[in-house]
């Protein structure tokens, strides 16, 4: 058995959950926050049989795409807030971070 841990941007999670359920895969949804942009994302825990892990990761890759987004950088400690004029910076967001780990034991009680 495999455990797939997928960290997905909030914009993609509903479409991904629908695609997974359509194929018969369940997921546990955990709210999480990204470290780089401090924006919300969702961590999905998906248990699969060993031979199904590739199909699940293919669904994630199909649904979760990267996109460009403008963000305003935060003021750093060295700068005073009154003299700081942020200019938006274009960054790449979205996609997914996927971890596939072997499950040694699984019990449903």
Image: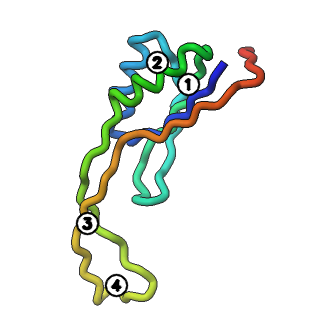
Which badge, 1 or 3, comes first in the chain's sequence?
Answer: 1
Marks 1 and 4: CB-CB under 8 Å? no
- Marks 4 and 3, the one that precedes in the sequence: 4
Q: How far is the residue under mark 2 from the one under mark 1?
A: 12 Å
Per the model, the C-alpha gap separating discs 2 and 3 is 36 Å
* Of marks 2 and 1, the one in the foreground: 2
Question: How many C-alpha atoms fall within 10 Å of the one at disc 3: few (<14), some, or many (≥20)?
Answer: few
Name which quarter of the figure residue 71 lies in.
bottom left
Q: What residue is pinned by disc 2?
A: 55
Q: In front of the other: label 4 or label 3?
A: 3
For disc 3, the marked residue is: 89
Label 1, label 3: how many angstroms apart (C-alpha)? 34 Å
Whether residue 34 is situated above or below residue 78 in the rendered picture = above
Question: Which residue appears at 30% of the width and 88% of the height?
Answer: 82
78 displayed left or right of 62: right
Say whether disc 1 or disc 4 marks the residue closer to the N-terminus.
Answer: 1
């Amino acid at each position: 058995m495999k455990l797939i841990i997928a960290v997905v941007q909030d914009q993609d999670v509903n479409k991904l959950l629908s695609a997974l359920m359509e194929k018969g895969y369940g997921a546990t949804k955990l709210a999480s926050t990204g470290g780089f942009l401090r924006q919300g994302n969702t961590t999905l825990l998906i248990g699969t049989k060993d031979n199904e892990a590739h199909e699940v990761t293919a669904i994630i890759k199909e649904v979760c795409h990267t996109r460009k987004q403008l963000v305003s950088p935060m003021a750093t400690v060295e700068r005073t807030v009154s003299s700081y004029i942020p200019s938006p910076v274009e960054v790449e967001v979205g996609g997914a971070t996927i971890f596939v780990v072997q499950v040694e034991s699984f019990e449903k009680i």
